[in-house]
Amino acid sequence: MSRRDPDERPDSEESVWHSEELVGLDPDDPEAQAFAAHLDRMQRSRPGFTVEGYLDGVGDFADSANRASGGRRLLAVVLVGLLLLVAGFLIWDALHFVVTTWL
């Protein structure tokens, strides 16, 4: 199994097809393309504990939520709604604190 440099990102979809797991698969088959995209996501290495790493994680969550259907999609929508509700409350609380402190 070959290892990629952690900072190296594939320039195109064709670079995914050099993996040993994809030998013998048809590159035009939609199922093989989905499997190649899955392998690329699994083998991708991103910086840990950085803003870029966290934003990549949020992007992966959004992509996964867009691919999901049924109960998983509903759960993702509820989770995002709760996060936005908490963020809105914290912003409101901070603004309320600042305004009442100045008055």
Image (cartoon, helix red, strand yellow):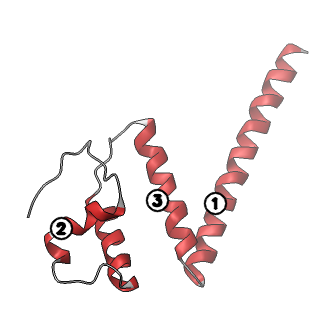
- Name the residue that disc number 3 marks: 60
The residue type indicated by label 3 comes to Asp
- Name the residue that disc number 1 marks: 80
Q: Quadrant of the N terminus?
A: bottom left
Give above or below for 53 relative to 73: above
Q: Residues within 10 Å of mark 1 (few under 14, many from 20)?
A: few
Q: Position of residue 95 (x, y in %)?
A: 80, 29
Going from N to C along the chain, the mark reached first, 2 or 3, is 2
The residue type indicated by label 2 comes to Ser
State left or right for residue 5 relative to residue 59. Answer: left
Instruction: Look at the numbered disc 3 and give the secondary structure of its residue.
Output: helix
What is the C-alpha distance between the residues marked 2 and 1? Answer: 35 Å
Disc 2 vs disc 1: Cβ atoms closer than 8 Å? no
Q: Which mark is residue 19?
A: 2
Give above or below for 95 relative to 26: above
Q: Position of residue 49 (x, y in %)?
A: 36, 39
Q: Quadrant of the C terminus?
A: top right
Which callout, 3 or 1, points to the residue nearer the camera?
A: 3
Q: Residue at x 49, y 45 (%)?
A: 55
Going from N to C along the chain, the mark reached first, 3 or 1, is 3
* Residue 15 in which image quadrant: bottom left
Which callout, 2 or 3, points to the residue nearer the camera?
A: 2
What is the C-alpha distance between the residues marked 3 and 1? Answer: 14 Å
Q: Which residue is nearer to you in this view: 76 or 62?
A: 62
Instruction: Look at the numbered disc 2 and give the secondary structure of its residue.
Output: loop
Instruction: Look at the numbered disc 1 and give the secondary structure of its residue.
Output: helix
Q: Residue at x 86, y 14 (%)?
A: 102
Q: Position of residue 54 (x, y in %)?
A: 45, 45
